[in-house]
């Protein structure tokens, strides 16, 4: 470990022991990581301005659209599965393979 790293670790340990991290805002709450975390600061600023104006980079628009489609597909699947189970439960001809009784 380099001298600088040792010094930084020592300062952090001292601050923890002194309780200096106990009064930080948001203590005990989950961290929300930004999806733009790997970008340079000037790129992050540009993306943040665009996002706050209602625009997203193309790859994030695609991601948003994909998540919406997956959610809708999952909902439709669960509805269809429920309807099918209800039909089977009531011996409805639609899902039993039997021909409906004719009068």
Image (cartoon, rainbow, N blue to C red):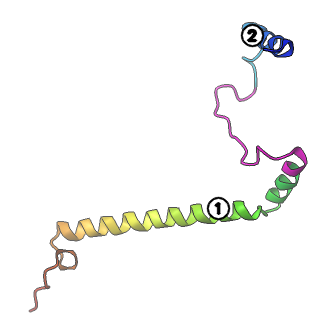
The residue indicated by pointer 2 is: 13
67 displayed left or right of 99:
right
Q: Position of residue 39 (x, y in %)?
A: 81, 47
Q: Is residue 71 above or below residue 7?
A: below
Residue at the right extreme of this rendering? 42
Residue at the front extreme of this rendering? 1
Q: Position of residue 73 (x, y in %)?
A: 47, 67
Q: Secondary structure at mark 2?
A: helix
| Quarter containing the N terminus | top right
Callout 1–callout 2 Cβ contact below 8 Å: no
Q: Position of residue 76 (x, y in %)?
A: 42, 68
50 displayed left or right of 26:
right
Magenta residues, start to end: 25-44
Q: Quadrant of residue 82?
A: bottom left
Q: Secondary structure at mark 1?
A: helix
Q: Residues within 10 Å of mark 2 (few under 14, many from 20)?
A: few
Q: Residues within 10 Å of mark 1 (few under 14, many from 20)?
A: few
Which is more N-terminal, label 2 or label 1? 2
| Quarter containing the C terminus | bottom left
41 displayed left or right of 24:
right
Which residue is depicted at the point 70% across and 60% down? 60
Label of residue 6 in the image: none
Instruction: State the CA–CA distance, disc 1 to disc 2.
Output: 41 Å
Which residue is depicted at the point 75% across and 17% down? 21
The residue indicated by pointer 1 is: 64
Which residue is depicted at the point 71% across and 29% down? 26
Q: Is residue 29 magenta?
A: yes
Nearer-the-camera pick, 11 or 49: 11
Q: Is residue 82 above or below residue 13?
A: below
């Amino acid at each position: 470990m380099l001298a600088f790293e040792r010094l930084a670790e020592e300062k952090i340990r001292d601050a923890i022991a002194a309780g200096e991290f106990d009064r930080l805002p948001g203590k005990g709450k989950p961290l929300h990581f930004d999806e733009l975390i790997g970008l340079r600061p000037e790129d992050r600023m540009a993306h943040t301005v665009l996002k706050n104006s209602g625009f997203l980079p193309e790859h994030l628009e695609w991601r948003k659209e994909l998540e919406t489609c997956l959610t809708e597909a999952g909902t439709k699947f669960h509805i269809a599965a429920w309807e099918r189970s209800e039909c089977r439960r009531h011996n409805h001809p639609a899902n039993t393979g039997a021909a409906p009784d004719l009068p």
